[in-house]
Image (cartoon, rainbow, N blue to C red):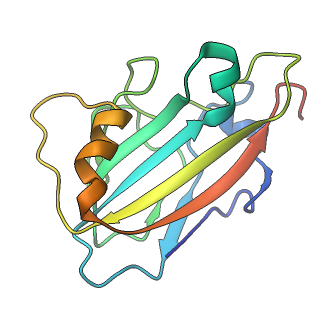
Amino acid sequence: MILKSNTFNNNEHIPKKYACDGDDISPALSWGDVPSSCASFVLVMDDPDALEIIGKVFDHWILYNIPASLTSLEENIEKVKEVAGRGTHGLTTRGTFGYIGPCPPSNTKVHKYLFTIYALNVVLDYTRDVEKEELLKDIKDNILQTAQLVGYYSRSDD
């Protein structure tokens, strides 16, 4: 499976438009080479470099039950729990729904942001809000394949 964006390449700088210093909107993403038995997707974006600052990985975006028929998400996905035809948002580290753009503290090193898509053989059935740790625990035995896109950002970037 492959995950990519038309706004930045793997291991490159995330444009300011998609960060807290810009418009703070989600980038367009697309994926391919999906297993034929895929029932849904989960997308997670997190910042593992936040561990050094806040003592944990910062979860910027969790979207699950993305329909298996989709192979892309357009730019600026709505920041609501249920995104019509796109899936359901899990809770970010801030306890909110939807995308939170890169926003490392000023005068810190460049942070690495991981966008990971999981192809699942199930559709999830949550009746409550869910955070990343619980979600990943629940899907571990249902992951068919994963793909990752890595982007970098610092507050001094333009």
For this rendering, which residue is in front, 136 or 150? 136
Question: Is any part of residue 84 visible from this angle?
Answer: yes
When asked about the image quadrant of residue 108, the answer is top right
The structure residue drawn at horizontal position 42% and vertical position 71%, both measured from the top left corner, is 71
| 140 lies above or below 99 | below
Q: How many marks?
A: 0
When asked about the image quadrant of residue 62, the answer is top left
Q: Quadrant of the C terminus?
A: top right
- Image coordinates for residue 80, horizontal then vertical, percent: 33, 31
Side of 26 where 69 appears, left or right: left
Side of 16 where 66 appears, left or right: left
- Image coordinates for residue 30, horizontal then vertical, percent: 52, 67
| 92 lies above or below 4 | above
Side of 38 where 100 appears, left or right: right
For this rendering, which residue is in front, 152 or 134? 134
The structure residue drawn at horizontal position 62% and vertical position 35%, both measured from the top left corner, is 48
When asked about the image quadrant of residue 106, the answer is top right
- Image coordinates for residue 137, horizontal then vertical, percent: 29, 44
For this rendering, which residue is in front, 81 or 11? 11
| 20 lies above or below 75 | above
| 125 lies above or below 120 | above
The structure residue drawn at horizontal position 69% and vertical position 31%, both measured from the top left corner, is 49
The structure residue drawn at horizontal position 32% and vertical position 53%, both measured from the top left corner, is 86
